[in-house]
């Protein structure tokens, strides 16, 4: 390259550099091709059981799920039409516990902000111990062991515990530990849950925003005072119960959308919960 | 700047430019920090009304929404506890119409794949004409006009029509066109809807995967045969009715998650629908 040409090119380059110094290049960088719609390719996994006559409710619940036929068939005008009415206790099947379920000043299901119902989640697999001992309590040691392998639970994450009991749903005896119904079944409930002190620890030290699991209750079957519920709900943390398909998720890198039916003043309600893998 | 310094700087710049010319800069750009979890920062907008005693159902529906108290107060063991049972027709408030609602071979609400309930959406604002004429029918001309401004509706998109009637909810008279209830109210229903031919056109030429709007029905109030419903549902396209807050969304660049209660065999059901803006 001849010196004259070099200076000419250099001058152009300097002009470009000055131009960049004025911020014009940054603007160009911002316009660089970034994935326009990062969600679009997402495949979602359904973590929800369907509601039907097999849906599991607490043993003393008299109603269960009812699906009343209002219309079903070809109308006088010649077109097909079907329509039904449902009746369901708020707490049964895959459902959400709103903080007011166990805390008088708790948020109702319709008051829960979407920021508590959407976001990053982790799955902590405790199925080894839980399947060995129907009265197993998930404790902070189990969580710290998980963290040693997978890293600390991110702040404001949803924590989903996989006890392995999901594989029994909707077999009442295998899932609840008793096939009995009515009040007399309650002393015979045996399924794992969260140790109350650990529920407080999750709220205070890990600042989780929601907790879910694949059993009928955040508390274990033998609980009398539902102290894990109380501990979470005093901290305005909702719970997800009877969550399905947790075996399909990795331990980390999960985004969850958990949308309960928006019942004004509800203590909980039917929940549709889905997840996608993001890393 | 002295000439010697200028040449030195220029030389470095030329080296960088040659480096970039060899493709190294493109590589660097590809390695630039891409958001690891693109969903995480998403803020969601709730497009769902709460269910309560004001929830609007079709005028001849005898039940409405019922929220029965099963427990509410401090228990003998000293902790607060509340729990309720709900009764609701599948079609009322913010809800989903599954294809089987008007098509015998249609998918039931639990059969709808999540791919039909999540994805890119557009909002087509027809409120100008719809608020002028309570019997307004959304036609393909209105959609083509919208496309002239915003581009063609993407294939497999959800289409949400904003009629502007959402602002009347839950004022029955303003929303439905009559304050009457019972069968005698039905001939007096006046609210806008989708022209049946246009419903077919949306299914066949635009291959939409779901259609929603801020009125009680995909069909207009004066419809006798619900032909827009039939046209969509014969194509296995679900509908979202009584969708809230469509005025908060831009015309394009929207991602929607629409999760109905998973009712086995349901013709529809309570819907929680949320949206986030992605561009």
Image: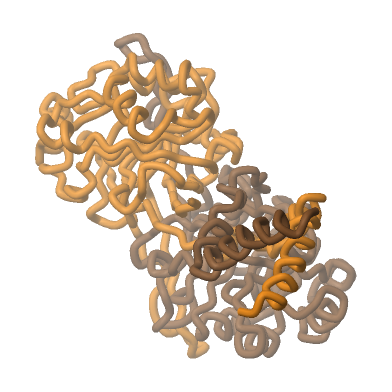
Chain colours: A brown, B orange
Q: In front: A160, or A191? A: A160
**Observer able to see residue A167:** no
**Residue B110: image location, x then y, percent:** 57, 38
Whether A262 is drawn above or below B178: the answer is below
Q: Is residue B235 left or right of residue A220?
A: left
Whether A219 is drawn above or below A8: the answer is below
Q: In front: B58, or B45? A: B45
Q: Is residue B208 left or right of residue A191?
A: left
**Residue B241: image location, x then y, percent:** 34, 39
Q: In front: B104, or B129? A: B129
Residue under the image location 67 percent in, 56 percent down:
A9
**Observer able to see residue B145:** yes
**Residue B202: image location, x then y, percent:** 42, 22
* The image quarter in which residue A211 lies: bottom right
Residue under the image location 59 percent in, 55 percent down:
A273
**Residue B190: image location, x then y, percent:** 14, 30
* The image quarter in which residue B51 lies: bottom left
Q: Is residue A161 left or right of residue B233?
A: right
Whether A159 is drawn above or below A3: the answer is below
Residue under the image location 56 percent in, 62 percent down:
A15
The C terminus of chain A lies in quadrant: bottom right
Tell how many labels: 0
Residue under the image location 48 percent in, 51 percent down:
B279
Q: In front: B128, or B9? A: B9
């Amino acid at each position: 390259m001849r010196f004259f040409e070099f200076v000419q090119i250099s001058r152009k380059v300097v002009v470009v550099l000055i131009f960049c110094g004025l911020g014009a290049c940054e603007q160009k960088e911002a316009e660089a091709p970034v994935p326009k719609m990062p969600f679009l390719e997402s495949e979602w996994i359904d973590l929800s059981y369907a509601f039907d006559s097999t849906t599991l409710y607490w043993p003393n619940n008299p109603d269960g799920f009812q699906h009343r036929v209002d219309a079903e068939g070809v109308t006088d005008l010649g077109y097909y039409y079907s329509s039904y009415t449902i009746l369901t206790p708020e707490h049964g099947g895959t459902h959400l516990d709103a903080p007011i379920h166990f805390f008088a000043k708790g948020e109702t299901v319709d008051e829960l902000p979407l920021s508590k119902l959407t976001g990053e989640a982790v799955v902590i697999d405790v199925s080894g111990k839980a399947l060995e001992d129907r009265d197993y309590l998930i404790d902070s040691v189990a969580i710290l062991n998980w963290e040693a392998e997978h890293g600390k639970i991110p702040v404001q994450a949803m924590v989903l515990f996989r006890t392995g009991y999901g594989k029994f749903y909707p077999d009442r005896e295998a899932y609840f530990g008793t096939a009995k119904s009515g009040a007399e079944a309650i002393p015979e409930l045996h399924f794992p849950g969260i140790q109350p002190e650990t529920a407080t620890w999750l709220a205070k030290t890990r600042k989780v925003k929601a907790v879910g699991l694949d059993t009928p209750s955040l508390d274990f079957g033998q609980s009398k005072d539902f102290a894990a519920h109380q501990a979470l709900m005093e901290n305005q943390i909702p719970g997800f119960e009877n969550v399905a398909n947790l075996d399909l998720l990795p331990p980390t890198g999960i985004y969850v959308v958990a949308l309960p039916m928006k019942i004004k003043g509800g203590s909980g309600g039917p929940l549709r919960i889905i997840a996608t893998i993001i890393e």
